[in-house]
Amino acid sequence: MENAKDTFYVTLRNRLAVLNPNRVMMLRGLQRPGILMEEAEVVVPQMPTDAFVLRWTGLDVDGQLPSALAQMTCEMHYTTGGTQPNAGLDRGRALEEMDAELFSILSPSCAQKINYTQTPAVAMATKVFWGIPQFSSASSQRERLTRIAKIAVFAFQEQGEL
Amino acid sequence: MSADLSVRNPNASPLFMADALLRAGGGMAVSLLTTPATVDSSDAGQLGINVPNFQQLPLSPAVFRKVHAAMQEGQLPQYELLVSASAVQKQVSALQVTSADALFDTAAGVEINGAQFLIESRSVSEALGQVYLYRLLLREAHLLFQPSS
């Protein structure tokens, strides 16, 4: 499952870097595309704004198939307060822009599974694939607008894989 | 009661006093874990595979103690760390960061006697607008110990 999670994150990150090179953030001293996997970063009191935060929640495994099929739920959290020149009055537009970006980077909805624990990373035999995102209604906390999109991610467990 | 309206110029005496009190109170050295000097830009570095190699910035003198609070079920014990502002300022200058706040904002935690703690909150004590003491509220990080190979 870890390889599927890693592949999903890296795929979306690379697609985001191409789609919107201006959506960047500074994290651990490095400028990166504005997307991060929460469980692989330092614990922070508040999620970063204008960046996508991946949080893995649900897990189901179907063992009735020749290869076990794992279904994982990925919650994509994103928050914006709009831009400074517009004094945050464009926060609705900024959130809509992030909605559109997320929808774009999720397509096509599959990627070759890659094992990143080896150097160089090794392509595996199966693919990771996912469904369409389920967008929650936007929640408003003072000047910040937040939305959560849930995505079901599927991957077959290959032999010897965790 | 009347206010003390005498003119007083800021000087370093509060800093010296704080350092002396922290040393007298058992002043110890702790390490602030911050962004490594050489950043890891690899995929493995962003996936939690590579060891982050945080820099360990020594802060001394400091006093570490358990916060005595009414505990409820499921509540984690909290600890307090009092750190000398002169030690923090030394690291701010060495790393050339804009402020102590910027330094703490990038910190991943604090290592004390080999155990890692997360920073829950921080506050400062000031005299005449000059910070002489940082107070960090810490929570023990639940990390799996793995002996070095």
Image (cartoon, rainbow, N blue to C red):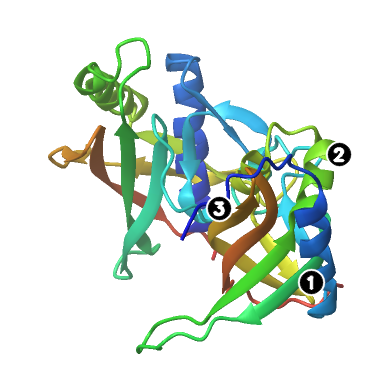
- Residue B54 seen: no
Quadrant of res A86: top left
Amino acid at dot 2: Ala
Say what secondary structure mark 3 lies in. Answer: helix
Residue B111 sits in quarter: bottom right
Q: Chain of mark 1?
A: B
Q: Which residue is mark 3?
A: A40
Judge depth for marks 1 and 3 and give the one in front.
Answer: 1
**Front disc: 2 or 1:** 1
Marks 2 and 1 close (CB-CB < 8 Å): no
What residue appears at the point 49 percent right and 31 percent down from the top-left corner?
A13
The percent coordinates of residue B6 (x first, y second) are 64, 44
User: Percent from the top left, x then y, of residue B90?
Assistant: 84, 45
- In the rendered structure, the residue with mark 3 lies on which chain? A
What residue is disc 1 on?
A: B21
Q: Are marks 2 and 3 on the same chain?
A: no
Determine the CA span between mark 1 and mark 3. 39 Å
Residue B148 is left or right of residue B102, and the answer is right
